[in-house]
Amino acid sequence: MYIIKLDGIKDSDFTLIAQSEGNKIGHLVFTVNVFDKETVIITDLEVRPKYQRKGIGKALVEEAIRRITKFSNVRRILMEDGSATGATTQIAFKLGFNYEPNFPNLRLVLPL
């Protein structure tokens, strides 16, 4: 069993963490783009190896999307896949993201 909660806000960065029995088992960061306030970027999705493939990464992204959609001016969410396995891309596709050719670093986009 795990819980997801907002761990902190610094400037325009929001950190979500997943915890199990008081231990941090995963996290992600989402940031309002300082140049384009209609765009939020999800980065740094990580889940400890022992807890991978249990839906925690997907749950973190779903919670981020839920929170982001409350921002009235946001029109799109970009997500970077920095994982060596492509696991972030797999999660993103399951949640409706598509490749965005206009952005570098294999960013994925979810229009709102």
Image (cartoon, rainbow, N blue to C red):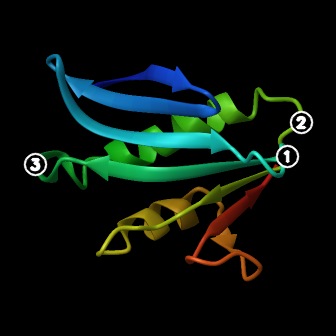
- Three-letter residue code for mark 3: Lys
CB under 8 Å between discs 2 and 1 = yes
Decide: few, some or many residues near mark 1? Use Cα within 10 Å; few <14, some 14-19, many ≥20: some
Indicate the position of residue 58 as horizontal and vertical percent values.
Answer: 43, 48
2 versus 78 height, above or below? above
* Distance of label 3 from label 2 (alpha carbons): 38 Å
Left or right of 88 on screen, residue 84: left
Instruction: Please tell me which of labels 2 and 1 falls first in the chain.
Output: 1
* Residue at the bottom extreme, as displayed: 101
Image side of residue 81 versus residue 70, left or right: left
- Report the amino acid beneath label 2: Asn
Q: Nearer the viewer, mark 1 or mark 3?
A: 1
Considering the numbered disc 1 on the image, is that residue within a helix, a strand or a loop? loop
Q: Secondary structure at mark 2?
A: loop
- For badge 1, the amino acid type reads Glu
Image disc number at residue 50: 3
Q: Are marks 3 and 2 in contact (CB under 8 Å)?
A: no
Q: Residue at x 29, y 75 (%)?
A: 84
Residue at 64% of width from left, 78% of height from top? 104
Residue 29 as seen in the image, left or right of residue 22: right
Q: Residue at x 79, y 29 (%)?
A: 71
Q: Which mark is residue 73?
A: 2
Which residue is at a point 69% across and 34% down the rendered structure image? 68
**For marks 3 and 2 on the same chain, the one whose residue lies earlier in the sequence:** 3
Q: Splitting the image into 4 quarters, where does residue 4 fall? A: top left
Query: Which of the numbered marks, if any, corresponds to residue 38?
Result: 1
Q: CA distance from mark 1 to mark 3?
A: 36 Å
